[in-house]
Amino acid sequence: MRIDVLTIFPDYLAPLELSLLGKARRDGLVDVRVHDLRDFTHDRHRTVDDSPLGGGAGMVMKPEPWAEALESVIAAGREELGDDAAPLIVFPNPAGAPFAQATAQSWSQRPWLLFACGRYEGIDERVYEHLAARGHELALASLGDYVLNGGEVAVLAITEAVVRLVPGVVGNAASLVEESHSDGLLEYPLYTRPATWTAPDGTVRAVPEILLSGDHARIAAWRAEQSRLRTAERRPDLLAPPAPGDAADTAPAS
Ligand SMILES: N#Cc1c(-c2ccc3ccn(Cc4ccc(CN5CCCCC5)cc4)c3c2)n[nH]c1N
């Protein structure tokens, strides 16, 4: 999988070189390139923003640097991946479709993701229009109903959720199956040694006997029931039928 990220804060994406993601890059399972949007400006101040036309608070990201940057990054990607290669261009956006595990599953099958990190109040709408008109596949995705200052944090989260599903990245693929949200339910309670633990306040806490029984069928049934109970208690919304268009995938830019 190839991942390109366009941002005015490249250093924000440094964590992509660490831990599991770093190893996946070193193992050649994922190829991550981070690009500075300001490299595609031509004025002395490397300007990427301007005041909103029509008034309003804050600044808006100018279309020129974005158009030039996206053109350049896509051309460079095609040099390596082939002329027919086409990225899914993902714009983290508070007005985007909710990024969910199903989105991560879907995007982990993609050969090429291109993340466009907005800042300020957002990106000039004509950038989305221009990309769509040129036949590019766009997705606007949101991490959740709260406001961040830009798209970089979302890209870190989305990239981690997606790349860990790429075959070979996580050592024990079985662990991906039983995780929260992978089957639509929250995961069951986890325990490890000691089987009986005396807490600092003196309370003796033992693990559920079933887990020490060695009866794997009964343990699996107990865990499934615990997942259902925990989901009903903490996230009953996950048990409701999904509404149409519930998660970000490749919804065209609005
Ligand atoms: N993913 C994700 C996100 C983001 C996110 C993602 C990308 C960008 C680029 C810039 N910002 C900052 C920002 C701040 C306020 C507003 C709302 N304004 C209302 C009045 C008219 C102008 C816009 C929009 C954008 C971003 C935030 N926030 N929360 C998520 N889950």
Image (cartoon, grey):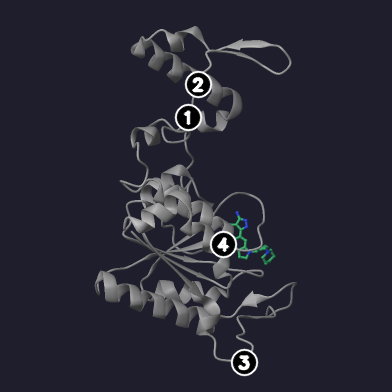
The residue that label 1 is drawn on is 185
Mark number displayed over residue 44:
3
- Residue at the location (35% across, 36% down)? 172
* Label 4 sits on residue: 152
Q: Secondary structure at mark 1?
A: loop
Mark earlier in primary sequence (1, 2):
1
Mark 1: which amino acid?
A: Leu
Question: Residue 192 has which mark?
Answer: 2
Q: Are the residues flagged by discs 1 and 2 in contact, CB closer than 8 Å?
A: no
How far across and down, in percent of the image, does residue 60 sit? 64, 75
Disc 4 from disc 2: Cα separation? 36 Å
Residue 179, image x, y percentages: 44, 33
Amino acid residing under circle 4? Glu
- Whether disc 2's CB lies below 8 Å from ligand 1 is answered no
Earlier along the polypeptide chain: callout 1 or callout 3? 3
Label 3: state its secondary structure.
loop
Sequence-wise, the earlier of marks 4 and 2 is 4
User: Residue 33 versus residue 91: which sits nearer the camera?
Assistant: 33
Q: Which residue type carries mark 3? A: Arg
Please tell me whether mark 2 sits on a helix, a strand or a loop.
loop
Q: Nearer the N terminus, badge 4 or badge 3?
A: 3
- Disc 1/disc 2 C-alpha distance (Å): 22 Å
Amino acid under label 2? Thr
Confirm whether residue 94 shows in the render. Answer: no
Q: Nearer the viewer, mark 1 or mark 3?
A: 3
Residues at discs 1 and 4 in contact (Cβ within 8 Å): no
